[in-house]
Image: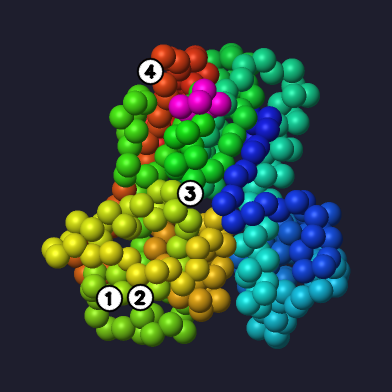
């Protein structure tokens, strides 16, 4: 990517220390990337082809990772290799580590290239995982086409409430949020619409319904949700409150600090949940999650860029905003 320098990830559910999981120590980011490919392809052979290594080398790496963590990550059959429940959970936790490592490596390449332009961005998790990386690639391409030195981006990933506070406190030049609760004291710019889906594990009763789930049913069931302050949760809460009569969400089955953790818990059968289509598209294709039809109008929201009135966007911020609004 070549445009980032530093990544700070904030989770209300705790922090990953770059070290221990279930008693084992993970120092090999490449092994986690390889596990992600096996999960995507449901096959060690296909994943090895995608990674450009031999099937034997990838299989040995997966066995080493399992020994390191002390858990079985894969079920190996003649028809392919599938993630175990523990494997899905580990991969959910690893997603954020892998993304942070990718951004760190890209940032180091930018430093080596001697770049001078800097931009501090704070982004909500859905946008940081699924949109911001593409926008940064487009930003670099646009800058290269214009003969401008590439921008070094410091990206902070947090929920929408925390992003708003970072912008207010001048800790980020621009923020990207997904909450419907827009701050009136900050400049706001529409970026794009996003659709939220109700999803469940294939074995969940809702996955086999031949009718739409009603809003009352959705409100009554304990969901796997993000933490308070996340845009995804706020959007669902407002959506149900706008029903006639107004509805309130049941106490959650579990609250988790990342979309990846929510996806893993839903796939493991903890309960259904509501997530961005962007966040679950791979899980839907691979059959790890099943979309559940919801009665009523579509559940949508808007991604929004924010910045302070007294801190006009820098040229780097203006270029980033133009890219984000264009795609």
**42 relative to 173, above or below:** below
Give the Cα separation between the discs numbered 4 and 3.
Answer: 25 Å
Stretch in magenta: 167-172
Q: Is mark 3 on a helix, strand or loop?
A: helix
Question: Which residue does the numbered mark 4 point to in the structure image?
Answer: 309
10 Å neighbourhood of mark 3: few (<14), some, or many (≥20)?
many
Kindly indicate whether the residue at mark 1 contacts the one at mark 3 (C-beta within 8 angstroms).
no
First in residue order: circle 4 vs circle 3: 3
First in residue order: circle 2 vs circle 4: 2
Give the Cα separation between the discs numbered 2 and 4.
Answer: 42 Å
Q: Is mark 1 on a helix, strand or loop?
A: helix
Kindly indicate whether the residue at mark 1 contacts the one at mark 2 (C-beta within 8 angstroms).
yes
Q: What element carries label 4?
A: loop
Q: Residue lying farthest left? A: 244
Question: Magenta stretch containing residue 296, yes or no?
Answer: no
Q: What element carries label 2?
A: loop
Question: Which residue does the numbered mark 3 point to in the structure image?
Answer: 126
Residue 120 position in % (x across, y down): 57, 26
**Is residue 5 or residue 134 the one in the foreground?**
5
**Is residue 169 or residue 315 the one in the foreground?**
169
Q: Which residue is drawn at 72% across and 71% down?
A: 44
């Amino acid at each position: 990517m070549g445009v980032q320098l530093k990544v700070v990830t904030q989770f209300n559910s705790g922090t990953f220390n770059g070290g221990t999981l279930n008693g084992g120590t993970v120092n090999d980011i490449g092994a986690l990337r390889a596990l992600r490919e096996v999960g995507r392809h449901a096959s060690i052979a296909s994943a090895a082809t995608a990674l450009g290594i031999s099937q034997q080398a990838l299989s040995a790496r997966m066995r080493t990772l399992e020994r390191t963590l002390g858990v079985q990550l894969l079920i190996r059959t003649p028809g392919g290799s599938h993630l175990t429940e523990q494997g899905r959970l580990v991969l959910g936790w690893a997603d954020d580590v892998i993304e942070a490592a990718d951004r760190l490596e890209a940032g180091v390449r930018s430093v080596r290239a001697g770049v001078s332009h800097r931009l501090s961005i704070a982004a909500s998790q859905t946008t940081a995982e699924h949109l911001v990386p593409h926008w940064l690639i487009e930003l670099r391409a646009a800058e290269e086409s214009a003969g401008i030195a590439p921008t070094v981006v410091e990206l902070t990933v947090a929920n929408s409430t925390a992003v708003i506070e970072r912008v207010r406190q001048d800790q980020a030049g621009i923020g990207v949020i997904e909450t419907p609760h827009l701050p009136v004291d900050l400049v706001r710019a529409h970026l794009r619409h996003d659709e939220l889906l109700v999803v469940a594990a294939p074995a969940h009763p809702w996955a086999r319904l031949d009718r739409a789930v009603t809003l009352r049913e959705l409100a009554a069931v304990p969901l796997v949700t993000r933490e308070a302050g996340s845009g995804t949760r706020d959007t669902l809460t407002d959506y149900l409150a706008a029903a006639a009569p107004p509805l309130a969400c049941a106490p959650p089955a579990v609250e988790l600090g990342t979309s990846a953790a929510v996806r893993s818990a839903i796939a493991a059968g903890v309960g259904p949940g509501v997530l961005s289509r962007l966040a679950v598209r791979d899980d839907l294709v691979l059959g790890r999650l099943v979309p559940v039809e919801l009665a009523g109008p579509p559940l949508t929201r808007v991604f929004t860029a924010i910045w302070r009135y007294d801190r006009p966007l820098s040229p780097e911020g203006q270029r980033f905003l133009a890219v984000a609004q264009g795609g």
